[in-house]
């Protein structure tokens, strides 16, 4: 329910937005106020975005409140959200700055790439997040300015110690669950009516295609950088569906393209290639040497005329390769 600015709420005058402001600023600083902020944000009171913007920009607030307000404000691609992110690119709090850079990469416009180019930092973690954000902007808008490197090594499965990936069309009931629980993936027009199950041994994933590439739009894979789609997984803690891999593509030759499976934080953990010819795409994916995904093979084809995706093969090892295990023992520095 929306309340006009003058209506008393819980015995106090002002909107829920003003209550939200008072709640955040009042002592003592308690954990429960974070949950209260999110609860009020979900009610979408009048002028909520203005209030959230002021909270994000207020460097006198504790960091957790600013991050909560930032998350609530950027759940949708709105002008005020983009303006707030741009205004916070010079923030002195490194953790807040990292989150701002990451969100701008996910929902920013093509012109925001220049803003990110102007960010200067000596922090190695921020530098990594900054490069990842530039890549996301480049692929989302087909700019061709930043690219992921082709990995020097990928891990394919052996038939000895592997399990099949369950694949198939998305059932109506599962699609309704996703719609009910919601997905937090702004910045990409995902087509939930073009989604498929990809079941690992212990977890269900769902591949959702980028609507721009459905049907004849698939020809863009060999013409410019694109987002092929997003592999989402259920967050069991809060019950929503969140991105597990972004599948980004880059033209290679006249009729072939690279496929990069990238985590939300920017780590590339899958790599493959595809070929487009006469309205048909043939593609394959394998795990890279990054120590988070065990060796796997996925082969699939998509026919634009019939709008049909078919998984020909999907197998995954039940454990990491030895070289991946060594990387976990000796993690790379940030």
Image (tube, rainbow, N blue to C red):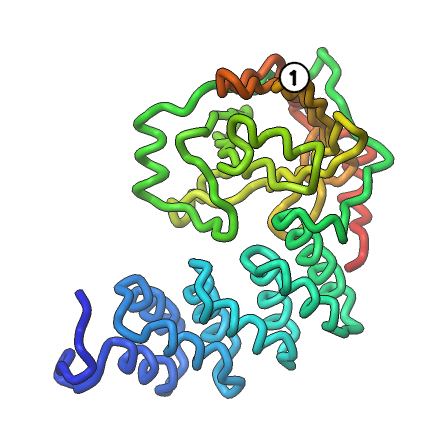
* Residue 255, quarter of the rendered image: top right
Q: What residue do we see at 55% from left, 21% from top?
A: 304
Q: Position of residue 329 (x, y in %)?
A: 79, 45
Circle 1 is placed at which residue position? 278
* Residue 125, quarter of the rendered image: bottom right
Query: How many marks do you count on the picture?
Result: 1
Is the residue 307 above or below the residue 97 in the image? above
Q: Position of residue 57 (x, y in %)?
A: 50, 81
* Residue 160, quarter of the rendered image: top right
The one nearer the camera, 21 or 201, is 21
Residue 166 shows in the view: no
Q: As drawn, is 24 to the left or to the right of 133?
A: left
Q: As drawn, is 251 to the left or to the right of 221?
A: right
The one nearer the camera, 31 or 84, is 84
Q: What residue do we see at 69% from left, 60% from top?
A: 129
Q: Position of residue 72 (x, y in %)?
A: 41, 65
Q: Quadrant of the N terminus?
A: bottom left
């Amino acid at each position: 329910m929306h309340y006009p600015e003058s209506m008393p709420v819980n015995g106090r005058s002002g909107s829920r937005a003003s209550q939200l402001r008072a709640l955040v600023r009042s002592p003592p600083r308690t954990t429960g106020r974070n949950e209260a902020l999110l609860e009020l944000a979900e009610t979408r009171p009048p002028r909520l975005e203005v209030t959230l913007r002021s909270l994000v920009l207020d460097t006198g607030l504790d960091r957790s409140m600013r991050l909560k307000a930032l998350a609530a404000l950027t759940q949708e691609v709105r002008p005020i959200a983009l303006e707030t992110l741009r205004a916070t690119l010079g923030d002195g709090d490194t953790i807040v700055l990292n989150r701002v850079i990451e969100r701008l990469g996910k929902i920013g416009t093509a012109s925001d790439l220049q803003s990110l180019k102007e960010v200067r930092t000596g922090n190695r973690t921020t530098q990594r997040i900054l490069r990842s954000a530039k890549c996301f902007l480049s692929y989302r808008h087909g700019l061709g300015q930043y690219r992921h490197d082709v990995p020097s090594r990928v891990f394919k499965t052996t038939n000895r110690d592997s399990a099949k990936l369950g694949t198939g069309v998305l059932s109506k009931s599962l699609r309704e669950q996703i719609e009910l629980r919601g997905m937090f993936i702004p910045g990409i027009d995902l087509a939930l009516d073009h989604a498929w199950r990809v079941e690992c041994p212990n977890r269900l994933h769902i591949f959702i295609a980028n609507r721009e590439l459905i049907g004849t739009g698939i020809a863009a894979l060999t013409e410019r950088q694109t987002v092929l789609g997003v592999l989402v997984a259920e967050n069991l803690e809060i019950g929503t569906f969140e991105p597990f891999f972004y599948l980004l593509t880059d033209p290679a030759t006249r009729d072939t393209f690279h496929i990069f499976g990238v985590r939300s934080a920017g780590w590339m953990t899958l790599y493959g290639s595809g070929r487009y010819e006469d309205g048909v795409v043939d593609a394959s994916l394998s795990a890279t040497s990054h120590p988070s995904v065990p060796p796997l093979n996925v082969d699939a084809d998509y026919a634009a005329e019939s709008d049909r995706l078919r998984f020909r093969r999907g197998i995954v090892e039940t454990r990491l390769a030895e070289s991946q295990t060594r990387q976990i023992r000796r993690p790379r520095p940030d």
